[in-house]
Image (cartoon, rainbow, N blue to C red):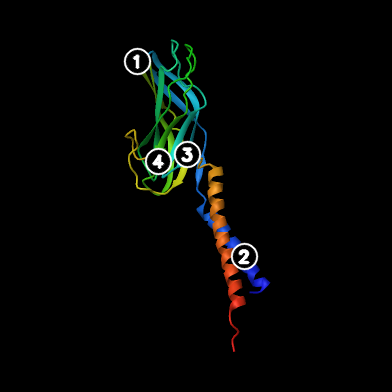
Amino acid sequence: MSKRRRSAVLAAAVALAGSAVWMAAPVAVAEVVNVNYTCKTPIGVKSAVSPIDITGVRSGSGYKITMSWQKGVSSSPVELGAGSMKPSATITLGGVDSGTLKVTGPANAAAIPENTPIKISDLTGTYTPKATGKVTFTAAVLTIEALGTTTTCTPANSPGPSLTLDVTASGGGVSDDGSAGQLPQTGPEDSAIALGTLGATVLLAGAAGALWLTRRGRTAPARR
């Protein structure tokens, strides 16, 4: 094979690798959304606005979904001792999926002083796609259990999605906590590593093909 022919084959392999990386790139759009909560507490109705961040990280056949609050959304008239406050929340699914995803988190590690905004720890859950396409994740009801009481906080401003994922159905199922079937970081680092490996595989395959053609050209018997 001529030098020009080998160069053309390798160039085609590189182009194919780049094309495969582009086509396989996952789509994930995250946005911090201000949520105006109306909270029904044991001492009356309270309201507070908190920016909500929802992220998805690939985990096996699903995604680990994490919901984060950047500000406290309620307070207590008495001190809440360590371990006395337990938060949980629901996330509304949209797009090609529907229903809700429950996310939970640990109790407060330190005491929360009276009349101080309650900082909610990050809450997590597992989502497994039941359909193929774009799925949105929007903050829904926050529940705070403390000292035998329950406070429910509901968005009053119809917030938009905090996360949109482009997913592929994987059979569905029910999570360990019994919530609806639920499948990053859809993060750029993990995706770059995975896609870089794909590109290298295609490139190596192209190089191997060029080497085989070269050897074949050298060993082929001359025609008479």
**In the picture, which quadrant includes the C terminus?**
bottom right
Circle 3 is placed at which residue position? 56
Helix, strand or loop under label 1: loop
Per the model, the C-alpha gap separating discs 1 and 2 is 69 Å
Helix, strand or loop under label 2: helix
Circle 4 is placed at which residue position? 94
Q: Which of marks 2 and 4 is nearer the N terminus?
A: 2
Label 2–label 4 contact, CB within 8 A? no
Q: Which of 96 and 119 is in front in this view?
A: 119
Look at label 2 and name its amino acid.
Leu
**Closer to the eye: label 4 or 3:** 3
Label 1–label 2 contact, CB within 8 A? no
Label 3–label 2 contact, CB within 8 A? no
Helix, strand or loop under label 4: strand
Circle 1 is placed at which residue position? 148
Per the model, the C-alpha gap separating discs 2 and 4 is 44 Å
